[in-house]
Each structure stands twice: as structure tokens, then as C-alpha cells.
Image: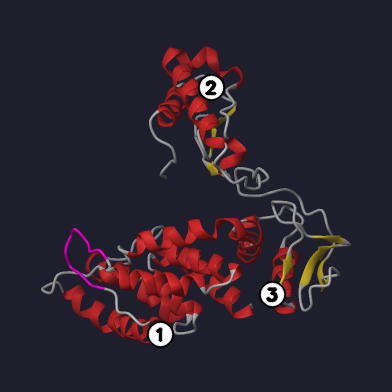
Amino acid sequence: MALRGAGAGALLIRALFRHPTCSSTVVVSYNVLLPVEESVGLLLLPETSLHAPVLGGFSSCLGFRGIAAAAEVKKNNAAAAADVVPRPSMPRLSSNGILGRRFYKKAHVKPAEDGSSGWYVVLLDNRVLKTPAKKPLKVPNAALAHAVAAEWEWQDSSGIRPFTMPLMKLAATSIDQMPSDRDRVVESLLKYFHTDSLCLRAHDMDPLAEKQVKMWDPLLDWFKSEIGVRPLVTSSIFGTTQPPEVLDAVEKAIRECSDWQLAAVDWLAGTARSLIVALAIARGRLGIEEAIEIIRLEEDHQVEDWGYVEGGHDIDEADIRVKISSCSVFLRLL
């Protein structure tokens, strides 16, 4: 897993990771909660809840290098804190991904009472469900509200499992982060559009190239008719740089998305490694199965050559299926 923050932050993480006697929990660098035990697990949390490294009783076991690294991280974080938009701090999960025991008897919905016509809130018993930023989970229509409520209703008495509630995650992201993060998300999507998977092709002599042309080119043709431009395609190992007119048209298409649509498009683009696929799903050009087939084209080609690895390919496929399906359903319910 890639860890954010370099230099001093990375040194601090390595110092803690190596030391065999540390057994507590320490918050390190920008966004990593690191339990230092025999087996180390990582839980990503919002950046601003972790700006000052908390060392507790670790100073005696870190040594001079680790203490110096911690001081440098604290200094760098303090300098950057003023420029960071606060994000909600998330509850801590157990090692098996459980948030806590189910504390409610029933999840249901009702119309919002703040004058927002057509909007609904989700309730756990008689309490309005809140986002991680403590805002009411208010959604644009009854259908989406019922879908989120169903995710909460599905949780059993042994514990609440956030990883089984992708619609809740998308709704909370739309409410908490998108209003303030729109520009950052748009800029990130445009930055990685230069390396969109559908624009990076195998060499003409590679058998994969023919499959890419057959499955991906129709989507690029649709993109041109829908967005107004056709992205450049290359088989160079150095990639390509999309021209300004392409980027301008893509940016316009992204900015037309509402906060709710953009949350799903951002997640889709990361899962598919393709903004083209994400927009095609968002605009109804691709269904779930066709999208998964396009996303997995290269991996399926490798499976044909090298075989199917249980515990690897099957898990990847299931993960992609959950993410693509949940985002597609979320978009259809808006």
C-alpha cells in the first residue's frame, strides 16, 4: 500500500515498523493509523484528523533518528495545516472491519422537514442518520433513501460493517466532501486522463491489440459523439499527452456533473482506471456487465495465457463488480 507523505514521514513510519518492542497504536504522518504489533495493519483515515503525530510512550524506543523524523513531520504538518480544508474524522474500525454492534432496531426513511421538496432523510429508529461530518444524511429522492436504509437494515446484531454499505459511502461523500472538493476532484481526473486505460494500447503485433480495437474503439467513437472530441491513442511506453481541446471538452463534461454524480464518477474512474468508462456508465452508455468486461479485458487476456489464480483474480473481479455495480445503481437512483 502506498503511504502519503515522503521524507521525514516515511522515516518515522519505518522506524516504528522496525522496532520489536512497540505494542501500542501510533498515529503517523498525514493519513495513516499504524498499529505496531507483530502483524501490522493499516487503516486510512481523513488527513486533517491526523496532522500532529501522537507518539505517546514511543520516544524511548524510537531513538534519535525517529524522534528527529517525528519533529520534522510535526513542523511540516503545522506549516501546511492552515491550507487544508477540514474533513470529518472517521470512527475507528476493528481489525475485521466492524464499526460496532448494531444499536438500533429499525432503519427507515421520511421526507426531509427543512423545506427541501422531494428530499428524504434516513432514520435509525427515531434518529436521523448522520454523515461522518455530523450532517443529516439527506438524499435527493425516496428511492435512494430506501436503498441506503436497506444497507443499514441488513446489518446484523454482531456488528456494523461499513464495507457492505457502498451507497451510504457515496451519499456521505457527496454531502461531506464534494461541495468543498469539487475543484480538486476535477483536477485529479483531468491529470490522470492522460493515462486513461482506453488510450494506452498494446503494440500492433500483440494479439491483445486486436481485442482492444474491437472492444474499446466503439467506446471512443461514442465519446466523440457525446463529448465532442476523440482522445489520442498510443502504444508508446511513454504514454501520450492529450491536446488542450480534448482536456477542455472533458473538463466541461465533468463540471456538468452534480456533487452526487461526481462522487460516483470519481470512484468509477479510479476503479476502471478510465474516465471514459466512468462517463459512459454515468451517461447510460455502458451497463454493469459490459463495463466489467471492458475494464477486465487485459487481465482476462492474461488469464487465457497464464491461467486463473484463485485468491487473486477472483477477488479482484468481485471487488470490481461491487464497486461498478454500486456506483451504477447509485447513479440510476439519483
Where is residue 281? Give x, y as percent: 47, 78
Where is residue 97? Give x, y as percent: 61, 49
Kind of residue at disc 1: Glu
- Which residue position holds label 3? 144
Return the mark for residue 226.
1
**In the displayed structure, does residue 90 sit left or right of residue 14?**
right
Q: Magenta residues?
A: 232-241
Kind of residue at disc 3: Leu
Q: Quadrant of residue 244?
A: bottom left
Give me the residue at 44% from left, 12% from top: 64
Kind of residue at disc 2: Cys
Which numbered disc flags the more N-terminal residue, 3 or 1?
3
Which mark lies nearer to you, 3 or 1? 1
Disc 3 and disc 2 in contact, CB within 8 angstroms: no
Q: Quadrant of residue 181?
A: bottom right
Mark 2 lies on a secondary structure that is loop
Where is residue 317? Give x, y as percent: 43, 67
Q: Residue 240 lies in magenta, yes or no?
A: yes
* Placement of the C terminus among the 4 image quadrants: bottom right
Foreground residue, 9 or 227? 227
Overall secondary structure of the magenta section: loop
- Which residue position holds label 2? 22
On screen, residue 126 above or below 227: above
Disc 3 and disc 1 in contact, CB within 8 angstroms: no
On screen, residue 331 above or below 194: below
Foreground residue, 57 or 253? 253
Which mark lies nearer to you, 1 or 2? 1
**In the displayed structure, does residue 213 sit left or right of residue 129?**
left
